[in-house]
């Protein structure tokens, strides 16, 4: 599908966000270093993952409305 320029920016933003979100998930769930971090830092990273996931979902809903 071809998007208008402002729509393409949203699609690109979501794609970039999802790459970062996947990397964060991998760090939290599969990297042993995560467990060595202070509990507060671990929680902040979990909170960040949750908010990034919500942000990605919102971008997805916006993109769905382009169609």
Image: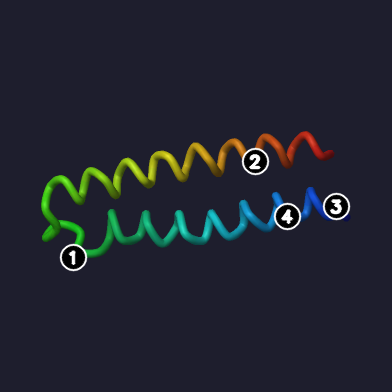
Q: Which structural element holds mark 1?
A: helix
Give the residue displayed 12% in from the left and 47% down from the top: 39
Q: Earlier in the sequence, mark 4 or mark 3?
A: 3
Percent coordinates x, y for residue 13 in the rendering: 63, 54
Label pair 2/1, CB-CB below 8 angstroms = no
Q: In the drawing, does residue 42 fall left or right of residue 63?
A: left
Q: How far apart in space, not on screen, are marks 1 and 4 (Cα)?
A: 34 Å
Label pair 1/4, CB-CB below 8 angstroms = no
Q: Residues within 10 Å of mark 1 (few under 14, many from 20)?
A: few
Q: Earlier in the sequence, mark 2 or mark 1?
A: 1
Q: Which structural element holds mark 3?
A: loop
Q: In the drawing, what numbered circle is on residue 60?
A: 2
Percent coordinates x, y for residue 30 in the rendering: 27, 61
Q: Which structural element holds mark 2?
A: helix
Q: In the drawing, does residue 54 fall left or right of residue 35?
A: right
Q: How far apart in space, not on screen, are marks 4 and 3 (Cα)?
A: 9 Å
The residue carrying mark 3 is 3
Give the residue displayed 68% in from the left and 58% down from the top: 12
Give the residue displayed 53% in from the left and 40% down from the top: 55
Give the residue displayed 11% in from the left and 53% down from the top: 38
Q: How far apart in space, not on screen, are marks 1 and 3 (Cα)?
A: 41 Å
Q: Earlier in the sequence, mark 1 or mark 4?
A: 4
Q: Residues within 10 Å of mark 3 (few under 14, many from 20)?
A: few
Tell me the mark number nearer the camera, choosing from 2 and 4: 4
Q: How far apart in space, not on screen, are marks 2 and 3 (Cα)?
A: 14 Å
Q: How many marks?
A: 4
User: Hey, which quadrant is residue 35 in on the image?
Assistant: bottom left
The residue carrying mark 1 is 33
Q: Earlier in the sequence, mark 2 or mark 3?
A: 3
Q: Earlier in the sequence, mark 2 or mark 4?
A: 4
Q: In the drawing, what numbered circle is on residue 9?
A: 4
């Amino acid at each position: 599908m071809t998007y208008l320029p402002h729509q393409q920016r949203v699609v690109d933003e979501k794609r970039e966000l999802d790459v970062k979100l996947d990397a964060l998930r991998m760090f939290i769930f599969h990297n042993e270093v995560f467990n060595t971090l202070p509990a507060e830092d671990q929680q902040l990273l979990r909170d960040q993952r949750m908010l990034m996931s919500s942000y990605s979902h919102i971008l997805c809903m916006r993109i769905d409305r382009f169609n």
